[in-house]
Amino acid sequence: MPGLNAVYEVLTFALDHRGHPVATGAPLQVDSEDAALALATRLKADHAGVAAIRRPVRAAIGETGPIEILFQAGRLGDFA
C-alpha cells in the first residue's frame, strides 16, 4: 500500500516478584524483519521472554496498524 511502512521492534521480559512477565525496558527498534528475528533469537537465552514484532505505520498521518508477532519465546507480558 502506498505510504505504508513498518517498524520492527524486539521486546524483552523478566519475571517480577510474583512470577509475572514484565517488560525490561523500551522496545529495541531495528531496521528489518531479519534484524528483529536475529536479535530476538540472540536475546531469548537471557530473558524470561522475548518477542520480535512488526508495526505497520502510515507515516503521513501517524497511524499504526495491528501488531504482528514475528517471533516469540518464553513468557510475554503486555506490549500492545
Image (tube, rainbow, N blue to C red):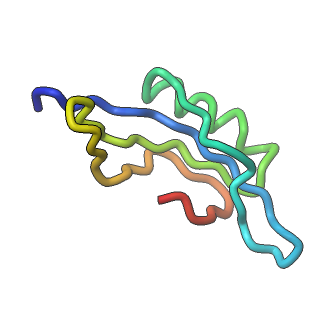
Of all residues shown, which one is farthest toward the right?
A: 17
Q: Please tell me how many numbered marks the rendered image carries.
A: 0
| Quarter-of-image position of residue 43 | top right
- Tell me the quarter of the image containing the N terminus: top left
Report the residue at 78% width, 49% height from top: 47
Q: Which of 8 and 41 is in front in this view?
A: 8
Of all residues shown, which one is farthest toward the left?
A: 2
Q: In this view, does 65 lie above or below 29?
A: below
In the rendered structure, the answer to whether residue 16 lies left or right of residue 24 reads right
Q: Which of 39 and 59 is in front in this view?
A: 59
In the rendered structure, the answer to whether residue 5 lies left or right of residue 11 reads left
Q: Position of residue 72 (x, y in %)?
A: 56, 52
Q: Position of residue 76 (x, y in %)?
A: 62, 62
Q: Nearer the viewer, residue 73 or 22?
A: 22
Q: Position of residue 54 (x, y in %)?
A: 40, 41
Q: In this view, does 15 lie above or below 50?
A: below
| Quarter-of-image position of residue 21 | bottom right
Report the residue at 47% width, 25% height from top: 34
Of all residues shown, which one is farthest toward the top?
A: 31
Report the residue at 47% width, 21% height from top: 31
Q: Position of residue 73 (x, y in %)?
A: 62, 53
Of all residues shown, which one is farthest toward the front?
A: 61
